[in-house]
Amino acid sequence: MTKKDYYNILGISKSAKEREIKKAYKRLAMKYHPDRNQGDKNAELKFKEIKEAYEILSNHEKREAYDEYGHSAFEQGNMNNGGFSSTFTSTTDFSDIFGDVFGDIFGNNSKKQASKKGSDLKYNIELTLEEAVKGINKKIRIPILQTCDTCLGKGLKPGTKIQKCSTCNGNGQIHLRKGFFTVQQSCPSCNGKGSFIKEPCISCNGHGRKEKYKTLSIKIPPGIDTGDKIRLVNEGEAGEYGAPKGDLYIQIQVKQHQIFQREKNNLFCEIPINFAMAALGGEVEVPTLDNKIKLKIPKETQTGKLFRIRNKGVKSIRLGTYGDLLCKVIVETPVNLNIKQKNIIKELGNSFNGLKGNKNSPKSKRFFDGVKKFFDDLTK
């Protein structure tokens, strides 16, 4: 089933600013929120669409991926396949839509401070141009904080229990009287957790996490380029005390190639030819990333001439179409000439009637005519 465009779902343009996106989301979320549409399945589905669109477009990196690759940026999504991926939640409190600041101001925030989600990680991977264009599976080994095997991420010594904080009575928040106002702040004894560990796990010192090395198999999709990122959901660091894991971002860097240069989905290369072929024409073999092809050089070809070979570039990740191969012809001046070759070239040069020959060197004639006119104008 074809997914709807995220911009259309929120009713905004593709150039919408962050404030416009947030405003559209709040308006639609209030209208279709399940709490206000009890039993209405259509409203529930609409709300899920709205929230999914907002989670993508309100995140700078996800929005860039969506603008570049569309929904395919997130279709490969599971934690092991190496594709762009994302996860969405289908429920949202009204306090999540408008923020928890009101609860903090008026002192009635009933939520305890949640355990902190694990940190996102970034891993830089370098590819050859061939690997980036054709795709490849890569194995990487990374240091990472993983859940402690002894306490299963709880930070507790096995057989013991977490202790309720007596300072805040397990609420994680305390209230301080300041003049006419009551100010709510995190409990200093438990740092807002509402509890504390009396007997920590010896293996992880009560942190619930230990540093280990992990090996992952990364699927690099064909057509990826320098600056692209691959997101692996839940492959980041483990969260504190059993909280969700962070994500792992694979940052792509493509090595410089000895023959080709890449610009988006097009490839460029320079093809040197001798001046005899440039003057008389001929054929030259041109490399591609798969094989060699013959390129016909017409007679009287000038240096710098650009030849376009269709569909011999890079396949687009999003569109599935191929870019082109652009070959720039460079007419090479001969070196290490013997006596016979020098005499032949000298005789050829004399037949041109010098640099100003209008028949064989039209560009030279136009140039020198222009120079003459320039100096004539100066002396008037």
Image (cartoon, rainbow, N blue to C red):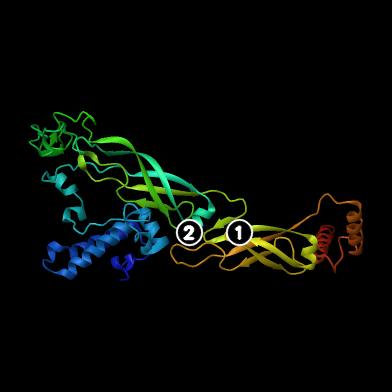
Which residue is identified by label 2? Answer: 223
Q: Residues within 10 Å of mark 2 (few under 14, many from 20)?
A: many
Residue drawn at (33%, 67%) of the image? 5
Left or right: where 64 falls relative to 31: right
Closer to viewer: mark 2 or mark 1: 2
Badge 1 is on which residue? Answer: 268
Circles 2 and 1: CB atoms closer than 8 Å: no
| Residue sitting nearer the eye, 205 or 365 | 205
Query: Within the image, what quadrant is residue 152 found in?
Result: top left
Place of residue 282 in the rendered image (x, y in percent of width and height, measured from the top left): 75, 67
Of mark 2 and mark 1, the one earlier in the sequence is: 2
Q: Is residue 224 left or right of residue 208?
A: right
Residue 337, image x, y percentages: 85, 51
Q: Label 2 vs label 1: CA separation? A: 16 Å
Which residue is nearer to you in this view: 111 or 284?
284
Given the image, on which type of amino acid does mark 1 rest? Phe
Q: Residue shown at 46%/51% (left/top)?
A: 227
- Tell me: 223 left or right of 14: right
In the rendered image, which quarter is residue 68 located in? bottom left
Residue at horizontal 62 percent and vertical 63 percent from the top? 326
Is residue 277 visible to the viewer in this orientation of the structure?
yes
Which image quadrant: the C terminus?
Answer: bottom right
Residue 125: give x, y in percent of width and height.
Answer: 45, 46
For the N terminus, the quadrant is bottom left
**How busy is the neighbourhood of tag 1: few (under 14 within 10 Å), some, or many (20 plus)?**
some
Q: Amino acid at mark 2?
A: Gly
Secondary structure found at label 1: strand
